[in-house]
Amino acid sequence: MTTRRQFITGGAALIGAALAERATAAPDIVSRQDPATESPRWLQGGKSYQPVVTLNGWSLPPRMKDGVKEFHLVAEPVKREFAPGMTVNCWGYNGSTPGPTIEAVEGDRVRIFLTNRLPEHTSIHWHGIRLPNGMDGIGGLTQPHIPPGKTFVYEFVLKRSGTFMYHPHSDDMVQVAMGMMGLFIVHPRNPKERPVDRDFAFLLHNWDIEAGTATPKSSTMTEFNLWTFNSRVFPAIDPLVVRKGDRVRVRIGNLSMHDHPIHLHGFDLQVTGTDGGWVPKSAQFPEVTVNVPVGAMRAFEFIADEPGDWALHCHKLHHTMGPMGHAVPNMLGVPHDDIAKKIGQLVDGYMSMGENGMAEMQEMQMDLPENTLPMMAGEGPFGPLEMGGMVTLLMVRDGLAHDDYRNPGWYRHPPGSVAHEVVS
Ligand SMILES: [Cu+2]
């Protein structure tokens, strides 16, 4: 008992150490060797699995005790910067939303402590993981709710590998809307099973945050105005940096209230996993857009054989916009300059919108309320990117040093390979 108390009170130090480690961690070392014939480089380095890269996130370091892998989660209010210029009052785990990624190996026995520092009770559900009923984390059904200030412990054996999630099952609507969620990755026991060179993971979410405010409206049902990968908004989302020829896996979980068809430019994908397990080879088929339904997870894989900067985004295109009101009158094709001038004389600051589309809004220097973001943001090598929300970039490069996956800067196209104006 003493040891357990020490472990629990030592949680803050553990978290601090993890944050320090995250800040200084060397980039992952991965393999480019043929997995069928040679051991991956990370295996030769003594690691028993290829760690995932959580976009704008981190993995929680475990502690081994009597052969059990122990983790300590702390549910608490957190501040999250969605992008420079906007910080949101969220709830999460261990200082972040999403909470830290839990990584373990098939066959591991895990013991997970959850300390509740929220102003109300909570619980934690292990989405997709096969476990005894009493560990399923449904407040009121499989366990008492965890009151503020108390710590509960969960313990189970990880029976199968795959991509899973965790989230509360107490006051579910409010706590998930506030950002309480995380990834739970179980790696195969045999590290030569399903090898990839780069393995990325993130969670999709929606938020309703009025311009000029900082707290999500937690009872909104469908009309959200902010769309995030791991509680970040483009262009403040980490890019996926890979080397040409890498085999890449992307794992995406959806705890938002909408489905998200996630589209990757430039490659054909195979869906290789869901939160129900790995998809048998005989059931896989090529895709370029993978719908990730509400309360589900999809993993897809591809070979990054074409260098460039490739967009990875939700194909519901209002999800690739920053905060905006959608109830605007349709002025496309309506000349309204004269009317706008007259209204402008009556209403201070009135601005007409979109006679020729919305692109013109991107270049206007509009005054924004405090603590909000523009609806389209980002400057590319050829001009404004006109997106902001569920978007990031897959950056495929030839000639990256094998352990250097920092953002390499914009792709330099070979001469003559960019679409250009012709004069007829
Ligand atoms: Cu979407």
Image: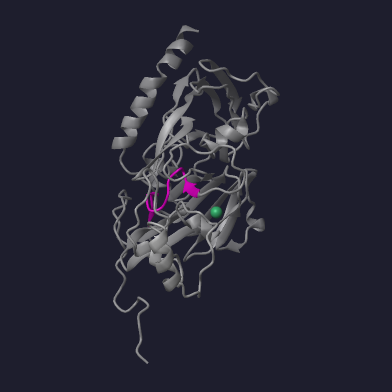
Front position in the image: 399 or 12: 12
Q: Which residues are magenta?
A: 226-242
Residue 106, image x, y percentages? 56, 35
Q: Residue furthest front?
A: 346
Q: Residue at x 48, y 45 (%)?
A: 201
Q: Residue furthest top?
A: 2
Q: Residue at x 50, y 54 (%)?
A: 325
Residue 45, image x, y percentages? 36, 39
Q: Residue furthest bottom?
A: 424
Is residue 246 in view?
no
Q: Quadrant of residue 43?
A: top left
Front position in the image: 368 or 383: 368
Reply above or below: 228 against 2: below
Residue 294, image x, y percentages? 62, 46
View quadrant of ligand 1? bottom right
Q: Quadrant of residue 282?
A: bottom right
Question: In the rendered image, which quarter contains the C terminus?
Answer: bottom left
Residue 308, image x, y percentages? 37, 65
Is residue 221 in view?
yes
Q: Does the magenta portion include 227?
A: yes
Q: Does the magenta portion include 29?
A: no
Reply above or below: 98 against 413: above
